[in-house]
Image: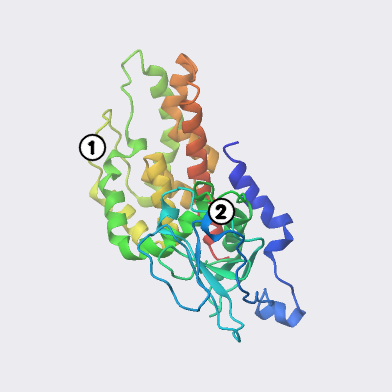
């Protein structure tokens, strides 16, 4: 169940024809993959008061102090350009933001030809700060569209749309806070999960230590071969000091990332409590299943010994799988091939 959201997202890209606009000719396919553009209409609302969305029909943007509203800018009567729908700031917090107000989800090339846009009926999707949601690749745009397609009619649930949330983070927050994001990641680098090791001479933790040596040491060997410095392990929750050369090398990796990569690395590092694991996924050293096994290594051994607490351990496992999987999928789909 934990992976159902990611599986549905990827499978729908292959089998749902509603994400594609009509191809007109072979020559047009070569220059523009999606040729038919949704035209604007007046929004149909059965009961506006029952929805958290606020629609504008006079072509003007209406100001509202309530950030939970969504504004749709309607075109003039003779305009053929599409309207837009702006996600509220509460979208980033995970609360339900209103009933589903659209029937069809499509993907089309952005009007400026740079990136791809998601269309909810005739409306172009925008970020919470009312910037166009221009995704860097077509596969990522289809995946975000799939998340919107799977929303239920009784409400838009942001917590079931991890790719959309990561896209907003990459497009809005990372460009403005990039130095702070990198600083925050590096501040916790010395306390990285893979640098912390249980005591070898303790009979209670001997089995865990053996597993850490078996599973984590290959990753540390890769770090040494990749960056030229051998990581130092500590038997302390507070970690220790890594070599300056390794710290500088990791910081340079972060500085060279694009916004989507940094957003994905930040999300994975936060969930894993390990920047090394996040970079390992980013560089193809670790697969999703391998990363989750390393993250949960000690806790899984404790569960095997003492048992699983329903409503606790199982939910933690499901949440971790969603966070790591969605960030890894976002990272892969955002890369231009």
**How many other residues sit within 10 Å of disc 1, few (<14), some (14-19) or many (≥20)?**
some
Q: Report the mark closest to the observer, 2 or 1.
A: 2
Residue 256 in view in this figure: no
- The residue shown at (36%, 40%) is 273
Residue 147 in view in this figure: yes
Name the foreground residue: 104 vs 202.
Answer: 104
Q: Is residue 312 above or below residue 180?
A: above
The mark nearer the N terminus, 2 or 1, is: 2
- Tell me which corner region of the image, top left, top right, bottom left or bottom right, holds residue 40: bottom right
Which quadrant would the C terminus be assigned to in this image?
bottom right
- The residue shown at (50%, 79%) is 59
Residue 109 percent location from the top left of the image: 60, 74
Residue 37 percent location from the top left of the image: 65, 76
Residue at the extreme bottom:
78
Residue 83 percent location from the top left of the image: 55, 74
Q: Is residue 211 above or below residue 337?
A: above
**How many other residues sit within 10 Å of disc 2, few (<14), some (14-19) or many (≥20)?**
some
Q: Name the image colouring.
A: rainbow
Which quadrant would the N terminus be assigned to in this image?
top right
For residue 136, the mark is none
Q: Is residue 108 above or below residue 263?
A: below
Q: Is residue 128 above or below residue 273?
A: below
Name the foreground residue: 287 vs 216.
Answer: 287
Pointer 1: what residue? 240
- The residue shown at (49%, 44%) is 324
- The residue shown at (55%, 66%) is 336
Considering the numbered disc 2 on the image, is that residue within a helix, a strand or a loop? loop
Residue 16 percent location from the top left of the image: 72, 57
Report whether 122 appears left or right of 165: right
Pointer 2: what residue? 99
Marks 2/1: CA distance? 50 Å
């Amino acid at each position: 169940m934990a992976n159902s959201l990611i599986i549905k997202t990827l499978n729908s890209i292959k089998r749902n024809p509603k994400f594609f606009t009509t191809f007109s000719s072979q020559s047009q396919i070569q220059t523009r993959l999606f040729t038919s553009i949704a035209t604007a209409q007046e929004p149909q609302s059965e009961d506006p008061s029952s929805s958290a969305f606020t629609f504008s029909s006079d072509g003007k943007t209406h100001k509202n102090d309530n950030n939970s509203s969504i504004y749709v800018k309607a075109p003039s009567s003779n305009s053929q350009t599409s309207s837009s729908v702006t996600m509220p700031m509460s979208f980033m917090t995970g609360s339900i933001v209103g009933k589903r107000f659209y029937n069809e989800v499509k993907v089309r090339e952005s009007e400026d030809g740079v990136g791809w846009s998601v269309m909810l009926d005739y409306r172009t999707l925008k970020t919470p700060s009312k910037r166009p949601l221009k995704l860097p690749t077509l596969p990522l745009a289809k995946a975000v569209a799939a998340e919107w397609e799977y929303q239920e009619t009784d409400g838009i649930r942001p917590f079931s749309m991890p790719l959309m949330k990561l896209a907003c983070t990459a497009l809005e927050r990372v460009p403005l806070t990039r130095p702070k994001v990198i600083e925050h990641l590096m501040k916790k680098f010395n306390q990285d999960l893979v640098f912390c090791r249980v005591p070898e001479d303790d009979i209670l933790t001997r089995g865990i230590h053996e597993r850490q040596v078996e599973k984590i040491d290959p990753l540390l060997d890769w770090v040494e071969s990749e960056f030229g410095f051998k990581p130092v392990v500590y038997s302390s929750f507070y970690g220790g000091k890594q070599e300056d050369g390794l710290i500088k090398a990791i910081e340079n990796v972060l500085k060279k990332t694009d916004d989507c990569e940094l957003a994905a690395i930040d999300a994975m590092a936060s969930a894993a409590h390990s920047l090394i694991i996040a970079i390992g996924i980013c560089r193809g050293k670790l697969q999703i299943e391998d990363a989750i096994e390393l993250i949960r290594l000690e806790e899984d051994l404790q569960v095997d010994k003492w048992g699983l607490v329903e409503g606790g351990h199982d939910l933690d496992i499901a949440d971790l799988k969603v966070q790591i999987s969605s960030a890894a999928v976002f990272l892969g789909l955002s890369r231009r091939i």
